[in-house]
Amino acid sequence: MPRKSTRTVGPEPLPGGKPAAGARRRGRPPRSAEQAEAVRLRVAAAAKRLFAEEGFEAVSIRRLAEAADCGAMTLYGYFHSKNDILRLVWEDFFTELFEQIQRATRRGPPAERLRRAARVYLDYWCEHPERYRMVYLHQDRTEGGERYYVEASSVVGRFEAFRLWVEAMQADGTGRRGDPQQLSEALICALIGLCHALVTIPEYRWQPREVLLDACLAIVRRDPAT
């Protein structure tokens, strides 16, 4: 009985194991860095719009993929989960915020620079309440070995500037005595609380924003009477 040929149909492989011209490669060709970045930008833009309009929980991966003009499986090639996409959105917001803070704090004494930073922080979230809700009203979650946003992002390091300004104020006599890390974190918590009140309860007649901001900054300022 003649043996059945085991030879594959198609072009002969070239010496060294390389396929001959015209041989079909399995799978999709790898995307370039530019193509990958283009997909991520489209997904981020779609996520910002949909999360703001419909709410994070209501938006499915399929809905995001359609809005970003790509397949759902393509999305999973770039992101572990929907929470991973939300973290990308957060990163865009914080990058924009701290770029504004950096521009506003290039010159001046430490107390003035800290006040301008706090004012930019407060104004940013109050002018973009939908962004505040996306960032601060969603608890971060992890799936399949993902890292939390505060662990994987540079955002914690960016807040380090607040501690450095508090230290500089203590050095020039305008800052309250105490642990600068504790004082700066207390200030940040106060600013987030103020943003929360102004964004989520806008119908209440709060004191003027400048007055409330100064009350927050009193946490780190030295009382002239002491």
Image: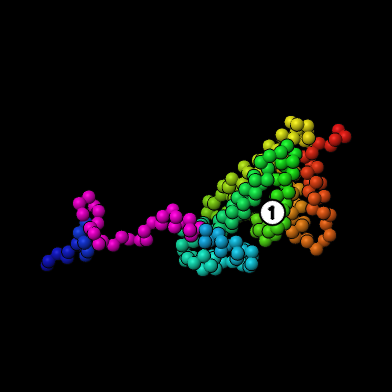
Q: Is mark 1 on a helix, strand or loop?
A: helix
Write the residue at 68% across / 43% down: 105
| Kind of residue sitting beneath label 1 | Tyr
Front-most of residues 72 and 21: 21
**Vertical placement of residue 54 versus 96, above or below:** below
Write the residue at 68% across / 59% down: 128
Q: Which residue lies furthest to the front in this view?
A: 107
Is residue 123 shown left or right of residue 39? right
Write the residue at 75% across / 39% down: 111
- Looking at the figure, which quarter contains the C terminus? top right
Front-most of residues 147 and 164: 164
**Vertical placement of residue 138 versus 110, above or below:** below
- Looking at the figure, which quarter contains the N terminus? bottom left
Front-most of residues 169 and 15: 169
Q: Which residue lies furthest to the left in this view?
A: 1
Is residue 216 shown left or right of residue 159? right
- Give the magenta part as a residue range: 14-40
Q: Is the magenta stretch mostly helix, strand or loop?
A: loop
| Quadrant hosting residue 217 | top right
> How many marks are shown on the rendered structure?
1
Q: Residue furthest right?
A: 225
| Image x and y of residue 54, in percent | 63, 68
| Image x and y of residue 218, in percent | 80, 42
